[in-house]
Image (spheres, coloured by chain):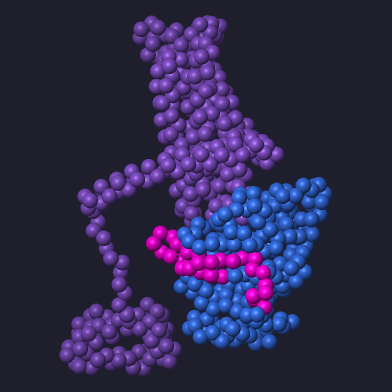
Chain colours: A blue, B purple
Amino acid sequence: MPRPPITPQDERDREAVIRVQDLVVGFGERLIMKKLNLDVYRGEILGFVGPSGQGKSVLTRAILGLVPKREGTIEVFGENLDEISPQSRQEIERRWGVLFQQGALFSALTVRQNVQVPMREYLNLSERLLDELAMLKIEMVGLKPDAADKLPSELSGGMIKRAALARALSLDPEILFLDEPTSGLDPIGAGEFDDLIATLQRTLGLTVFMVTHDLDSLYTVCDRIAALGDGRIIAQGPIEAMLASDDPWVRSYFHGKRARAAMAGAA
Amino acid sequence: MAALTNSVGDAGRVLLDLSGIDRLDTLGAWVLDRTRHELGERGLAADFVGARAEHNILLNEVAYRGFQGAPVKDTWNVVDIFVDIGKTMVEAWKDLVRGVSFLGELVMAMLRLLVRPSRFRLPALINQLELICFRGVPIIVLISFLVGAIVAQQGIVQLQRFGAQAFVVNLSGILSLRELGVLLTSIMIAGRSGSAFTAEIGSMKMREEIDALRVMGLDPIEVLIVPRVLALMIGLPILAFLAAMAALLGSGVVAWIYGDIPPDVFLARLKSTIDLRTFLVGIIKAPFMAIVIGVIASNEGMAVQGSAESLGRHVTASVVKSIFMVIVLDGFFAIFFAAIKF
């Protein structure tokens, strides 16, 4: 299903749920982010691309507050993360869900218990409702019910990603952060995962921030793409804008052999 | 090849006939092309002839290029030693600062839990108590029993020379209650539970589980570390008490068998030499030892970086530092109690 292209006019009208301004992040003397600006609008799936080792994950981690920033502001839901109280920060934290690259499931807990961790923390529910809700999420992400009582060490790579997604979705977040959700999955599994994210985004009205290398995902599910280069956003916009960009890295990324195959697949 | 290179005189042009080669791997191709390159450097134009098409592709692929090895540093230097010592001292200082600030965070987390006790994780505490305290009993009791027995045996041998072997009761009674019980327990717990904390927390750090907790709005210190440190603070005094009793039992048994001091005499002498204070001196130290072990173990766990090697290094550091600090702290307590004449 082709989506209507997003014009600059639309962008002004839309609410930015994440607004990163002049972000500077560095480790030692090496600067990873040099005055980076990026807006993520409500209800969109933003694909975030960039060369390996340039700090795609670092931006995600900086927004999540896992990596200290040196300068700049990060606003989530219109609130500056530096200026809010721990309570309001916690309020924001329960409104986002994160899928880490390796899943980061709690290894001592079963899949069901993993999905229940945020629920137990924030909701006061009966055991029965907790179990039912957890099973619902587990089925939603396409896992079989018997996976619920397995430990993360007993799951395959694809199942770990799905289980971690179920945990990320456990509180029905408004923003979903995905760090390379399809890496390490076979093409069929990756395609299913893309469809799943698109479906969830439509049904739950999620805003998705997706770090990815997967050109198929970029073509099939992303509304907008932002490309990172040298600590800044070097191009952003829908896929057409990427194809039209004259930045050498963006050109070679979206006009390479693999990109053409993905484009043909999406068409 | 070297012989070949040398045997070529000043022919001006060299042809390397490769037509007899059936299989060529990267090593062979590299040596061939390097030879061609070396001949070229001597002003001899060398060329391959008769190579198969696929061998030509390989030869092009591994075409000779100079590799620069990593610069070799001077192996030994007096200045390096001082630099090393300096760095170690700075690191040790930073370690101390980190430890103290971590202790501060821990106390803050505990105070927050005091205000909102509903957030406290009782199941985690019970679980840790079982692991630290209950499952640690056999080995700690056994070791304390043995050390108590050895001290008594040595005491008897030495005191016999002065005909004062009855004083072995004073020796082992005071030693067991004041020092042995708590010190042996602390060292065993540092090795047994401290290493486990560091490994658990470190592997959670490696697998981004700690980050996952944070982004869910959960405080890793509150969730993971407070229950562990509290379990240590409760478990260590209990274990120290059991260890002291086991050490007394060990020395009692040895005194009976080896020193001909029957149990009733042993108990009577014990009663006259020790009082509640002797016992308190030992047991008061236990919770402090627990905090030291807990803080060092958790701090090392949180410092683990991505690799398995880093995990191993921090587990080792955790045990070594805990044992060292436990003994240092024991020394401070000895001075303190002497100063207040307790």
Q: Majority secondary structure of the magenta segment? A: strand
Camera-side residue of B22 and B285:
B285
Q: Residue A267 or A121: which is nearer the viewer?
A: A121
Identify which residue is drawn at 25% across, 83% down.
B38
The N terminus of chain B lies in quadrant = bottom left
Point out residue A261 in the picture as x, y percentages from the top left corner: 61, 85
Q: Is residue B182 above or below residue A14?
A: above
B95 to A60, vertically: above or below: above
Residue A171: image quadrant is bottom right
Identify the residue shown where x is 77% and y is 64%. Answer: A140
- Whether B47 is among the magenta residues is no
Q: Nearer the viewer, residue A219 or B325?
A: A219
Image point (32%, 80%), residue name: B65
Residue A142 visible in image: no
Q: Is residue A11 a member of the stretch shown in magenta? A: yes
Query: Could you say where residue B306 lies in the image, as x and y percent from the top left?
Result: 50, 56
- B184 or A161, nearer to the observer: A161
Which residue range is magenta in the image?
A10-38
